[in-house]
Amino acid sequence: KLTLDESLEITKIYSVAGLTRGGDGIIATRPFRSPHHTASPIGLVGGGTHPQPGEVSLAHRGVLHLDELPEFPRSVLESLRQPLEDGRITVSRAQGSVTYPAKFIMVGSMNPCPCGYLGDTKRMCICTPSQISRYSKRISGPILDRIDLHLSVPAVEHDKLTTDEDSEPSLVIRRRVQKAREIQQRRLAKTKYKSNGEISSAQVKIDCRLSPESRELIKGAVQRLNLSARSFFRVLKIARTIADLAGEKDIQ
């Protein structure tokens, strides 16, 4: 759930963008933005003759969903570097510059290859290796390095679509997430941060302390997987979040 401060932040942005109506009051739900892959750099990060907030700022404190990620122009994806790293975007023009907040969860989705069947157990991929390589290279290494989690999602079997078996209700999941977020807010109460995803490298050293065994594990992973410094700190923040979701004081 949004805190009052977060609601005010979002409402200010939507007011600047002319997306609020008189009498609506403050925005009380987290924004979900899903721009089409034909969106321009200005549409995504903001700008124009009179700089306005783009999709990254309209998704502030919410979710920015980029479907068909490789179909976005490379220049548009590269413009996400600053907001993903700093949580803000600065638009510069001849008459001056404007900085808008842009702290969001980015969710990108894509096919495994142009035809969509690479790795499928029932249909054969018809793409050539060069086509697959070109497709995956549309997303640069620096952008991939700024994405915390990479998940492969296989096709859902027909039996699972028609089963009567109940899955975990969204309301139960939300309570668990809410509890984890409240743990983070209490831990970060005396700082400028609101969640694990925002904390600096210096704050990671305070809040993500590791046991000697855990330090050896992450050291081996850094060497074996050739992780960047950015990836190293992101792994620690994810580990801290997993511990919060489990209600654990220490990272295991």
Image: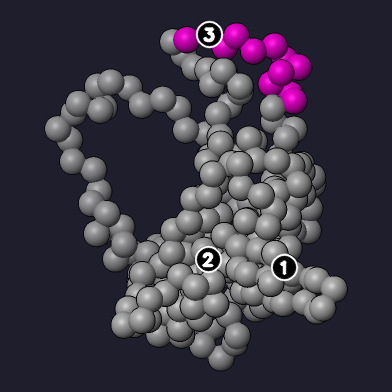
Residue at mark 1 to residue at mark 2: CA–CA distance = 18 Å
Proximity of marks 1 and 3: CB atoms separated by less than 8 Å: no
Residue 112 as seen in the image, left or right of residue 248 = right
Q: Which residues lie in the magenta part?
A: 123-134
In-image side of 230 versus 31 (left or right): right
How far apart marks 1 and 3 lie (CA) works out to 49 Å
Where residue 154 sits: x, y (%)? 45, 27
Amino acid under disc 2: Leu
| Mark 2 Cα-neighbour bin, 10 Å: few <14, some 14–19, many ≥20 | many
Three-letter amino acid code at the position of disc 1: Thr
Marks 1 and 2, the one that precedes in the sequence: 1
Mark 1 Cα-neighbour bin, 10 Å: few <14, some 14–19, many ≥20: few
Identity, as a three-letter code, of the amino acid under mark 3: Met
Q: Mark 1 = which residue?
A: 49
Q: Choose between 87 and 189: the one closer to the eye.
A: 87
Find residue 233 and report its horizontal and vertical position in percent.
69, 62
- Residue hosting label 2: 58
Residue sitting at 70 percent across and 48 percent down? 77
Quadrant (top left/top right/bottom left/bottom right) for the N terminus: bottom left
Residue 39 in the image: above or below residue 5: above
Q: Which residue is found at the position 18% from the left and 28% from the top?
A: 163
- Nearer mark to the viewer, of 1 and 3: 1
Q: Are marks 1 and 2 in contact (CB under 8 Å)?
A: no
User: Which residue corresponds to mark 3?
Assistant: 124
Give the residue drawn at x 25%, y 59%.
Answer: 172
**Crowd tier of the residue under label 3, counting other residues whose Cα lies within 10 Å: few below 14, some 14–19, many 20 or above:** few
Q: Residue furthest bottom?
A: 190
Mark 1 or 2, closer to the camera: 1
Visible residue check, residue 138: yes
Q: Looking at the picture, how far across and down is residue 64, in whole percent?
A: 52, 56
Q: Can residue 231 be seen from the camera position used here? A: no
Q: Is residue 210 left or right of residue 10?
A: right
